[in-house]
Image: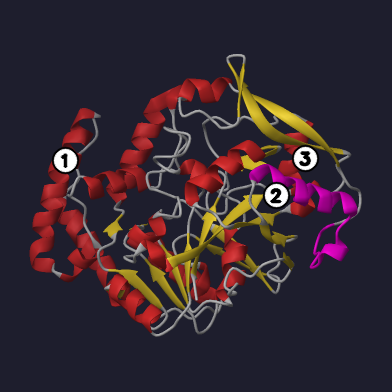
Amino acid sequence: MADVAVIGAQWGDEGKGKLVDWLSARADVVVRFQGGHNAGHTLVIDGKVYKLALLPSGIVRPGKLSMIGNGVVVDPWALADEMDRLRGQGVAISPENLVIAENACLILPLHGELDALRENAAGDGKIGTTKRGIGPAYEDKVGRRAIRLVDLAYPDTLADKVARLLTHHNAIRRGLGETEIDADDLVAQLQEIAPKILPFAGPAWKILHEQREAGKRVLFEGAQGILLDVDHGTYPFVTSSNTVAGQAAAGSGIGPSAVGYVLGIVKAYTTRVGEGPFPTEDTGPVGQRLGERGREFGTNTGRKRRCGWFDAALVKQTLKLSGVHGIALTKLDVLDGFDTLKVCIGYEVDGKRVDYLPAGMDAQRTVTPIYEDMEGWHGSTAGARSWADLPAEAVKYVRRIEELIDTPVALVSTSPEREDVILMRDPYKDE
């Protein structure tokens, strides 16, 4: 039985949370493998809303094992708060159903401070980060000076590791005219939070292998979207980790052959949070209507999302980058009531037509989208659970998207509710 990876195929916010939750009914283990608490998932289950940031979506389902892999950077204070909040909603969280990779790197308060200092100083050149310290934490990981979760278990050597880290960070702070971080104070903060997090630490890679050997189904849960990938996204307006499906293996400690099916989550239109290129963005009435109907605000940040028409050229590109086998098309109901829909099928760059978004930042800013018009529909798709429930024009829209992106639609999501799904192919089902 192939394990499944769920990947956002646009700029994030595609509705992965609901689909991961829906698929977790078919899985035994749910693994988060990259990112930090800058990317949130909203789950709506029987009318009850759960907002997740670091915890895998499987945590709300009894009997499932949730894992935070080594590819995630973990803010222990944010995670403790998130666990307390969910427990207040009746969600059981214990070392029995949650494992955090002991080699995961930590986000510290100094990371968020540095993130904000840089972003605020950038002016018009800002990236649009959430200022939660994700980027600086990954920098320390790559620089081999990070504090990892396992380090909290060894208080005798923790002070030396903090001192080494602060040699780097205090030099930066002095250059920015900021006060230095006190090493003893930081060590004390880490020792205070350690008892809340350490009970969940373990060799996640080993536990994951044991689960697979026992025949358990695994669901790999990505955060953000492929267009925010640090290598393949709209650089430099990207996140600080790899968001493509290949990261599911490296970020959880499993071989790439373990991922047998990649499901790309694709919104029926396009949104983006923060700065950076967005070829199909509509800043007029259409964009405003999509934003209002789709309730396009960040789960954790509350930031308003930029909105525009579906970009088939861009999605086709991202699906190839992640080896996507099928897509889940979300928020189709937001398009109800439009007389005409536009779909981007390519771009014009310097007078030439291209079928992909160039890597250069200058080219990305100047591309002109080429649109194909499609007839809209005035019936409702909200809550549909079969093709027969959809207006004919909506079916044509979905089928045309399949043609343009050269990838089949496996599922269609028609509302935030868990069961409002039209299923064409179950990613966990054998061919």
Residue with the mark numbered 3: 289
**Label 2: which residue?**
402
Q: Say few, some or many: other residues with alpha carbon within 10 Å of mark 1 (under 14 / 14 to 19 / 20 or more).
A: few
**Magenta span: chief secondary structure:** helix
Task: Report the amino acid beneath label 1.
Answer: His
Q: Quadrant of residue 210?
A: bottom left
Query: Taking 69 as reference, is 129 above or below it?
Result: above
CA–CA distance in space, label 2 to label 1: 50 Å
The label nearer to you, 3 versus 2, is 2
Give how far across and how far down residue 105 sits, in percent: 27, 57
In the rendered image, the vertical position of residue 254 relative to residue 109, given as above or below: below
Residue at the spot x=38%, y=47% of the render?
Answer: 241
Decide which of 50, 227 is in the foreground and name it: 227
Judging depth in this view, the residue of 144 and 79 nearest the camera is 144
- Callout 2 amino acid: Glu
Residue indicated by mark 1? 168
Q: Can residue 269 be seen here?
A: no
Amino acid tagged 3: Arg
State the residue at coordinates (57%, 45%): 10
Quadrant for the C terminus in the image? bottom right
Image quadrant where residue 71 sits: bottom left
How dense is the environment of label 3, judged by Cα within 10 Å: few (below 14), some, or many (20 and up)?
Answer: some
Dot 3 falls on a residue whose secondary structure is helix
Residue at the image point whose x is 62% and y is 64% from the top: 18
Q: From the viewer's perspective, is 192 left or right of 86?
A: left
Q: Is residue 318 left or right of residue 418?
A: left
> What's drawn in magenta, residue-wise?
381-405
User: Crowding at label 2, few (<14), some or many (≥20) Cα neighbours within 10 Å?
Assistant: some
| CB atoms of marks 2 and 1 within 8 Å | no
Front-most of residues 22 and 128: 22
